[in-house]
Image (cartoon, rainbow, N blue to C red):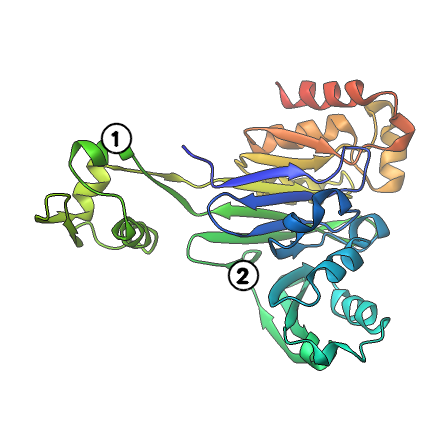
Amino acid sequence: MTPHFLPRLVNPPFGDPGVYVDFQFARRALLFDLGEIASLGARKILRLTDVCISHTHIDHFIGFDLMLRIMLGRDMKLRLFGPPGILSQVEHRLASYSWNLIQSYPTEFVITVIELHPEGRARRARFSSRRVFTREEEEEFTFRDGVVHEEENLRLTVTFLEHSIPCLGYAFEEKLHVNFMKNKLAALGLPVGAWLSEVKRAVLRGAPDDTVFKVTGPEGKLRELSLDELKEQVLQVVPGEKIAYVTDTAYTPENRRRIVKLARRADYFFIEAVFLDADHERARERAHLTARQAGTLAREAGAARVIPFHFSPRHLGAEEQLRREVAEAFGS
């Protein structure tokens, strides 16, 4: 299957946490956490449509200013998800600058901030450059089963973890992966084109198998094909890709249960592995995971692959040992 998303760590594992998810077939990207992001460069930052903040310790949020500076002066819309308090924190950050010139800009940059609370409660507000980033259109809403954003074929899910303060874990997934086999299309004399997008949308919305599509072949002859025929002959429909992200959390029974549920069968599980197992008491005191705990959680979740990060600087000379402990616990 051709992957639709390319996830990667923003920084090396001893640097600020963050995962950048690039969309292969759209001018779009998603970012988990907003620490130091200079290594991404302006081009990648300008692809962002969604940013998911786990919590606002400085190494997870200091990149906000750089992102703001790069996006200013452009027609852009950004969604930013975060824990309780994020609305006020963004509002105060924006208010710390003088905006006396911004209303002369011909463009509009809008940040919609979604503040998430336990038990499915949330608040949303927007900040527009046209109105000097004043908080507006504030509203409360609810969400179910952790799903905080949904599109035709995409879903963003959150879980609340304990890190002495609330810390959010996220899962981003494609509901279904629809792939057209070009060799089978060619063998049947079927052209590529916009009609394939219509077929894909029909599959995603669960259209009946007897739905008929009219296709004009290269010879100009009109053909009628049912969705069932297309599924059987030229389509591959499988569960979509899933990316889970967990950082800064204690190894408690409730956190473990929530993490495993969130990351169940993830294709990519990015998880902090801050300390070596020998430092498990220190990890408990700091509400962080050890490398062995990280690998264990990835195994229990049935993840396809685990990518550890957020290594403690105290283990600068032990990167291979940290990775080995994760791999051994994961079973790879």
> In terms of image quadrants, where is residue 141?
bottom right
Earlier sequence position, callout 1 versus callout 2? 2
The circle drawn on residue 272 is none
> In terms of image quadrants, where is residue 82?
bottom right
Q: Residues within 10 Å of mark 2 (few under 14, many from 20)?
A: few
The circle drawn on residue 183 is 1
Q: Is residue 243 shown left or right of residue 56?
A: left
Q: Secondary structure at mark 1?
A: helix
User: From where the camera sits, is residue 295 visible?
Assistant: yes
Dot in front, 1 or 2:
1
Residue 175 lies, in percent from the top left, at: 43, 47
Q: Secondary structure at mark 2?
A: loop
Reply above or below: 58 against 236: below
Which image quadrant: the C terminus? top right
Instruction: Residue type at mark 1: give it.
Output: Asn
Which residue is depicted at the point 64% across and 37% down?
8
Residue 131 lies, in percent from the top left, at: 70, 81
* Residue occupied by mark 2: 144
Which residue is depicted at the point 31% across and 49% down?
200
Instruction: Residue type at mark 2: give it.
Output: Arg
Which residue is depicted at the point 77% across and 49% down?
162
